[in-house]
Image (spheres, rainbow, N blue to C red):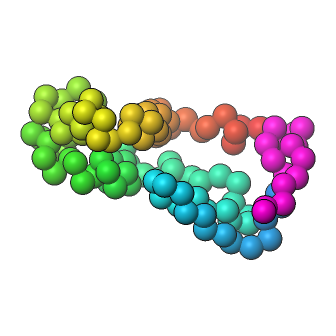
Amino acid sequence: NQATGAISTALNRGKHTTRQVKLFKNASGFIADTPGFSAIDLFKIKVDELGNYFYDLKDASVKCKFRRCQHIKEPGCEVKKLIEEGKIAKSRYDSYLKIRQEISENRMPEYLKK
């Protein structure tokens, strides 16, 4: 059991209660609970390299028709094919698209603006 705190009215997110690093395994990977981290800065990642950070997209992309496929509109995209077949979770692809948009617009996420 993990201790939880109240929601901060200033930040509209949970108050920090973690005292030690914990790694939790779930069906699709791991979740890290790390003290001192309230956000991850993804803005140093180049938009055309983002797919390399998604292991399932990276593995599938070796079969894409184009070597630098961004998995958006390119014909012969293996990633899009596997999503349609249900072999890559659409939620993973949606996360990829959301992060890609934030990076390309050089936009700071809402939770960091407060």
Q: Nearer the viewer, residue 99 or 103?
A: 99
Q: Percent x, y for residue 21?
A: 68, 71
Q: Percent x, y for residue 28?
A: 46, 53
Q: Is residue 5 magenta?
A: yes
Vertical placement of residue 61 versus 37, above or below = above
Q: Percent x, y for residue 20?
A: 74, 73
- Which residues fall within the magenta stretch? 1-15
Q: Quadrant of residue 10?
A: top right
Residue furthest to the bottom: 20
Q: Quadrant of the N terminus?
A: bottom right
Vertical placement of residue 3 versus 79, above or below = below
Q: Residue 70, can we see it?
A: no
36 lies left or right of 82: right
Q: Residue 12, can we see it?
A: yes
Which residue does the image show at 39% across and 34% down from the upper left? 90
Q: Percent x, y for residue 11?
A: 82, 41
Q: Nearer the viewer, residue 43 or 83?
A: 83
Magenta: main secondary structure? loop
Q: Quadrant of the C terminus?
A: top right
